[in-house]
Image (cartoon, rainbow, N blue to C red):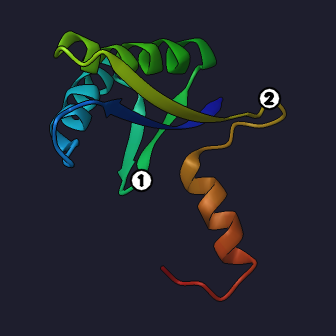
């Protein structure tokens, strides 16, 4: 099971808001059927490594389809193969070891 965090930033949009482009990338992600969580600074995706990488590529391409000529994407990838860990499990593990309740 792979867990990835991706942030896709179109450059040269003519304005400061990129939420419309983020929404377009999320439409690609929704089509994939993968589990994901939108956060203020990126999107967490979990699933089979090949499927995760394929959807990240599709998401990265969406601003280009809207006429943007440069896209900067960052990807963090956790590919754990010794057990079936999910994004919520990782958070729960940390919370169990601290007094954080959020």
Q: Image point 42% across, 46% down: which residue?
A: 42
Q: Real-space Cα distance between discs 1 and 2? A: 27 Å
Q: Residue furthest right?
A: 82
The percent position of residue 29, horizontal first and vertical second, equals 32, 25
Tell me which corner region of the image, top left, top right, bottom left or bottom right, holds residue 40: bottom left
Residue under label 2, please give it: 81
Left of 36 or right of it: where is 10?
A: left
Of residues 83 and 70, the one nearer the viewer is 70
Residue under label 1, please give it: 41
Of residues 40 and 11, the one nearer the viewer is 11
Q: Image point 41% across, 53% down: which residue?
A: 41
Taking 78 as reference, is 16 above or below it? below
How many numbered marks, from 0 up? 2
Number of residues whose C-alpha sits closer than 10 Å to that of mark 1, classed few (under 14), some (14–19) or many (20 or more):
few
Give whichever of discs 1 and 2 has the lower sequence position: 1
Q: Quadrant of the N terminus?
A: top right
In the structure shown, which secondary structural element does the residue marked by tag 1 occupy?
Answer: loop
Q: Image point 62% across, 19% down: which residue?
A: 49
Of residues 66 and 31, the one nearer the viewer is 66
The percent position of residue 19, horizontal first and vertical second, equals 20, 43
The percent position of residue 59, horizontal first and vertical second, equals 35, 21
Tell me which corner region of the image, top left, top right, bottom left or bottom right, holds residue 23: top left
Taking 102 as reference, is 1 above or below it? above
Tell me which corner region of the image, top left, top right, bottom left or bottom right, holds residue 88: bottom right
The percent position of residue 26, horizontal first and vertical second, equals 27, 31
In the structure shown, which secondary structural element does the residue marked by tag 2 occupy?
Answer: loop
């Amino acid at each position: 099971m792979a867990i990835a965090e991706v942030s896709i930033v179109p450059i040269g949009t003519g304005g400061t808001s990129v939420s419309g482009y983020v929404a377009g990338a999320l439409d690609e992600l929704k089509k994939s059927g993968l589990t994901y969580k939108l956060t203020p600074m990126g999107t967490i995706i979990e699933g089979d490594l090949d499927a995760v990488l394929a959807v990240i590529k599709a998401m990265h391409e969406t601003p280009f389809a809207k006429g943007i000529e440069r896209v900067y994407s960052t990807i963090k990838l956790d590919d754990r193969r010794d057990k079936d860990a999910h994004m919520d499990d990782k958070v729960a593990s940390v919370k169990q070891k601290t007094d954080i309740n959020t």
